[in-house]
Image (spheres, helix red, strand yellow):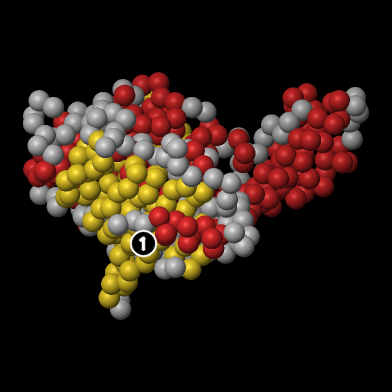
Amino acid sequence: MVRDSQLKTLHAASASRDPLLQRAKIAKVNESENNPMSMRLSRLQLLDFKNHAEVELDLCSHVNCFLGDNGAGKTNVLDAVHYLGNAKGYFNPIDSQNIRHGREAFLVEGTFSLDSADGEELDRVACAVAKGQKKLLKRNGKAYGKLADHVGRYPVVMIAPADAVLVLEGSEVRRKWMDMVISQYDRPYLDRLMQYQHLVQQRNNLLRYFAENRTWDEDQLAPWDERMVPLAEEISAERARFLEEFEPEFKRIHHGLCGGKEDVSLARVSLVETGSFGKALMEARANDRRLRRSTVGIHKDDIDFRIGDHPLKRFGSQGQQKTFLLALRLAQVEHLAKRVGRRPILLLDDIFDKIDAHRAGALMETLGHARFGQVFISDTNPHRIPKLLEEAGVPFSAWWVETEGIQPWADAGITESK
């Protein structure tokens, strides 16, 4: 079982270390276009994580179902897996708020099984957080010196109801999603993106200074423009390459989920044509001066989500929007598998509301394919997912989650009426 001494040891080691979780530059990893390494989480242990006092689970290499009522802690189990892959929670970025109420620290520990040409390798990863102390992340007993050494090693993709913001909110959300995917396997891209964002901020500060002091000097803008142009051109080109690679896989997956009944597409929307960013900056200076900010650039890019010939946001039903987002995330799994070289673990949190039985069955069949690797699913319906998985012939393990603890689903005595 998870022991208190483990938590004390982890935090004793953290006292003399530099801050681990700084804003890191993601290291580019080798691409593996054909045969991504198989990766699965074989064991998960929790101590005082969110509402779970102590949990120890041996996991299925295919699909793992966490079933229970709302508020029981199903999502918290998925979030713990996200911690192991990304050293942070998906739902709450404040680590100390993920400590169980009344306790001083939490520990999430997992064992990853990795298949390689030399056979199976086992990696033990532990993430510990104590109030008032630095977060500590260890792999096989050795603490990381920086986050960049961990990110991308055990890729994880979460699909949750909050993903609806990708459809319903503004361009910034979709742009951040695209940048996040690319940055996981391309360090130079992230470097350029951070430099560009810094330059935009400095340029905006200068524009505000001009307005507040009732002055204007275009010569002072020129150095910022000159530095932004090459970065913008390179970022723009990489975004175009990403969508060119990503869209065909997205369409293929979506076709399977909806039975070919709907046509969907992704298209990058940019106010600046390739090769004309410098000219666009010059032409926008009057607007920049009036609005006190940089009004054109790759920081205004968007992705157009379409169903048929219409915008998904306006013309897609809730079920169609959810299917679109499922296909988007599943394509993200496939894209990262090719680029990172390991099949990401897929976390599906409460995704079955507002999709019909046909789409749900198609999703289970899709997830049963080996190419999607290991899957974790939560649901409030105690029978829906096990039944769909049995019908699709997909191996799975299931647990019943209650505030008092977690037990095997088969032992919980759940009736159809529960």
| 300 or 177, nearer to the observer | 177
* 93 on left or right of 372: right
The location of residue 377, given as percent across then percent down, is 26, 42
The location of residue 382, given as percent across then percent down, is 16, 34
Quarter of the image for the C terminus: give it: top left
Q: Secondary structure at mark 1?
A: loop
* 107 on left or right of 390: right
Which residue has dot 1 on it? Answer: 342
Say which residue appears at 33% left-offset and 62% top-offset: 112
Whether residue 188 is situated above or below residue 380 in the rendered picture: below
Quarter of the image for the N terminus: give it: bottom left
* 19 on left or right of 360: right
Say which residue appears at 48% left-offset and 61% top-offset: 9
The location of residue 294, given as percent across then percent down, is 72, 34
The location of residue 416, given as percent across then percent down, is 8, 29
| 344 or 266, nearer to the observer | 344
